[in-house]
Image (cartoon, helix red, strand yellow):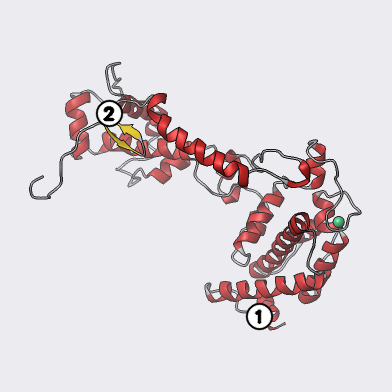
Amino acid sequence: MQVSGLVEGTLPFRYLGVPIKTTRLNANDYKPLIDKVINRIRGLGTRKLSYAGRGVEFRRSPLVSWDKVCRPKQEGGLGLKNDILWKKASVGKLVWWLATKPDHLWVRWVNHTYLRGQNWHSYSPNTASSWCWRKICQTRDIFSVAYQQQIWSIQNGQEYTVAKGYEWLRDKGQKVQWYGHIWNKWSIPKHSFISWIYQQGNMNTNAKLYNLGIKEDNTCYICGSGIEDLDHLFFDCRYSREVIILVGEWLRMDIPIVGLLAWRLARGGTRDDKGIINAVINACIYNIWQQRNNCRMNAYVIRPSSLARQLIVDLKSRFLYAKENGNRGNGGLVRVLLER
Ligand SMILES: [Zn+2]
């Protein structure tokens, strides 16, 4: 301590208003933090979290469940980590140390304080043990099957990592067919994201809000003559048709407006060519959705020809970027499109 110049502190102390101590915190301890968060949300709520239009107010509900968001992209999610599972997997690291690293300083301390020569796999904590220690023992029980199956063992060179523990803990889903349509290097990330929401079928179109009883009118903002559901908005509205036809002229392809998604599934060509077509479709979905929102908020849309022109400029710069940052895609469709 003297050499390092550090000062010895004492527990408990406060961090963000919450006391840090060795025992489990109770609801009262968290109160200052919770109050702060609630005040912050209330401040936001009046400005950002409500739909103020047309005299109707309702709270935003998430478009996609958290569980779905946390799946890997290949399984239809956004690839975020589920924080609760990640925490368990992190504690799993301590379980692993206890099982495999007898010389580790912390393990030696645990052996001295709690285990006292007992086998870690069969040890059970007594009720007087600290909350933290009991949590570690509970986590060991969660992972016990993996240890029985020797999924991680030093002998096999299979060291435990938090990422591997997380993979083991989570429910694995089916791979989705449309993964590559949305997530590919040719697509602009914000386009991929809106296309991903579209793929969930959960966009807040007028038809959906009308069916939920939130809106009194389900007609399309842009053309005013159709029911604004996903099929109408992206593939049937005369505005969208015009944009897609113009983009098709750039591709020199007849993009079928009805059945566009089946067309993208069935298309042949190299992997890059397919990626480019998918990037174009993602761009159409993003831009049409943006114009629809523009129409809702500001009561105007930009002309289909201007939108198509802007969309093509954006795509070209993305293609150029992707081409320069990858070792593929020097021939085929991308070269032709960049020159057009
Ligand atoms: Zn329309």
Residue 270 picture quarter: bottom right
Location of the C terminus by quadrant is bottom right
197 on left or right of 155: right
Q: CA distance from mark 1 to mark 2?
A: 63 Å
Give coordinates of residue 218: x percent, y percent. 85, 45
The residue that disc 1 covers is 335
Element carrying mark 2: loop
Is residue 180 visible in the rendered structure shown here?
no
Give coordinates of residue 227: x percent, y percent. 87, 49
Residue 336 vs residue 265, the one in the foreground: 336
Location of the N terminus by quadrant is top left
Residue 68 vs residue 101, the one in the foreground: 68
Q: Quadrant of ligand 1?
A: bottom right
User: Looking at the image, is 127 positioned above or below residue 1?
Assistant: above
Label 1 crowd bin: few (<14), some (14–19), many (20+), radius 10 Å: some
Residue 13 picture quarter: top left
Residue 56 vs residue 240, the one in the foreground: 56
The residue that disc 2 covers is 22
20 on left or right of 315: left
Give coordinates of residue 140: x percent, y percent. 36, 29
The amino acid type found where label 2 is placed reads Thr
- Which of disc 2 and disc 1 is earlier in sequence? 2
Element carrying mark 1: helix
Task: Looking at this view, name the residue that lies furthest to the top.
Answer: 127
